[in-house]
Amino acid sequence: MKRTILTLSFFVAGATTVFAQKYITRTARISFNATAAGSPENIEAVNNEVANIVDGKTGDIIFQVPVKSFKFERALMQEHFNENYMESDKYPKADFKGNFGNIAELNFAKDGTYETKVAGKLTIHGVTNEVNVPGTVTVKGGSVLLKAKFKVKLQDYKIAIPGVVADKVAKEAVISLESSMTQK
Amino acid sequence: MRKAFILSFLFACSTAASYAQADKLMAELDEPATNKKEDVSATFKATRIINSSSVENLAAGVLDFRILHRFGRVSDGFDNAFGFDNATTRIGLDYGITKWLMVGIGHNTLYKANDGFVKAKLLPQQNNGIPITLSYLGGINATGDKAPPVPPGTEYFFTHRLSYTHQLLIARKFSNRISLQLMPTVIHQNLVDSSKYSNTTYAIGVGGRVKVSKRMAITGEYYYRANNADMLSYGVKTYNSLSLGAEIETGGHVFQLFFSNSLGITERAFVTQTTDTWEKGQLHFGFNISRVFTVVKPKEFRGDAKKW
């Protein structure tokens, strides 16, 4: 009986850690570069308003990206990005729902750097695809820093590139992400 | 046995709890995003509908080089190559100071006029918020051609060349396809035949844009003058201005093509000095070309700030 109580208290304690082990930020940064080789202008943009949450217990990870918050060097490019390519009024958000493949090896309570792989569903422009993204997790002083770089084929997300800009816009965009989360 | 049962029951409970937790993760991110008021973008595709200014402003730090062409009357026929031989032009520079304030200057071949304007966005249309965009446009125009005949004993001063425009631009993007704009307009001309006409012309303009495909739209605008409708321009009868056109978005700019009975490009010229009429087929083909340059980069792209 004593042991049962012990086990019980262990589970209760476990449950409370589940609640405590969430890390969140609303200022994660995602940038992309879709400049075609030889293009006279850079097709790149940065978004500093990405929301990211991680459940340290289950390894679930979610990103939410307000598409209109991508900033371009040229205002006209930004307008075209939203109006013609991403159709941001119709699809205001891109998101990712995934899971750390090696959550058991990640210790968010202890400083350190880990290699990881996140698998999940990436939705852009209303189209969802399964993706597998390698990245690094750096835990330092209670905050969790996530970094990843991966490629996305525009065609996979039904983003049409008209012929006149085919020499400027690459078929694949390189996406870089940096997210510094703190415990919720 | 009993212990094992309790154990597995508790384990099931905690797993269920954590699954529910995962489902809630998304909701936790969603919370503050709802009810967020967001400015509506791209009510119009350019800073001009056809002749009129639209509620669109240039972004801060953007310089816009504009070449506007109006050909002669199509009805002049073959002798003037359907108007091609009598083109007038406005060449101008616009600049966005902030996202809500822009200025511009230009020179017109018609009446050798120089003009300048200030446009300020006072209210932006928002999703879940303000229903319209409201802008103010103030302009000044100085003709540069030869002094017109004035009654004997009077003198033609420089100030006689000046006229002023004040406009409110009230626009609403009704859907992704349809945008409309109302333009109450006041034009003050320093020199008119004051025995017959008022120095100040009141007019109301209406303009709009209907998207027909992703990169093409039909545009139009019309001005109704509440007074001075019978005012002559250099001795010639005047009409209300009506323009219809199309705009095509290319990679770098918006190309606007249209027909108008107005030859003038500044507000004074097209509202009060339109001497041609659609009824007689006195149309002018015209186009607007614009090329934008980013003079001041957005802060995300300045020097060291760009570490991504």
Image: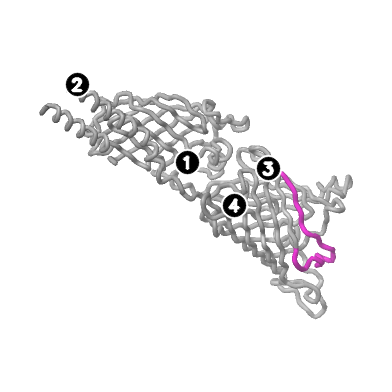
Q: Nearer the viewer, mark 1 or mark 2?
A: 2
Query: Label 3 to label 1, Cα distance in Å?
Result: 25 Å
Q: Quadrant of residue B300?
A: top left
Q: Are circles 2 and 4 on residues that touch, CB within 8 Å?
A: no
Tell me the subunit letter for badge 4: B
Query: Label 1 to label 2, Cα distance in Å?
Result: 54 Å
Query: Label 3 to label 4, Cα distance in Å?
Result: 16 Å
Region of the chain picked out in magenta, as a range: B225-246
Amino acid at pointer 4? Glu
Q: Tag 4 or tag 2, which sits nearer the N-term?
A: 2
Q: Tag 4 or tag 3, which sits nearer the N-term?
A: 4
Residue B56: which numbered mark, if any? 4
Relative to residue B170, is residue A31 drawn left or right? left
Q: In x, y percent, where is residue A39?
A: 54, 32
Query: Label 2 to label 4, Cα distance in Å?
Result: 70 Å
Q: Which residue is mark 2?
A: B4
Q: Which residue is mark 3?
A: B217
**Residue that protrudes farthest toward the top in the picture:** B1
Q: Which residue is mark 1?
A: A70
Amino acid at pointer 2? Ala
Amino acid at pointer 3? Ala
Same chain for marks 3 and 4? yes
Q: Main secondary structure of the magenta part?
A: loop
Q: In x, y percent, where is residue B170?
A: 62, 57
Query: Label 2 to label 3, Cα distance in Å?
Result: 71 Å
Q: Tag 3 or tag 2, which sits nearer the N-term?
A: 2
Same chain for marks 1 and 2? no
Quarter of the image that includes the C terminus of chain B: top left
Tell me the subunit letter for badge 2: B
A60 up-or-down from B304: above or below: above
Same chain for marks 3 and 1? no
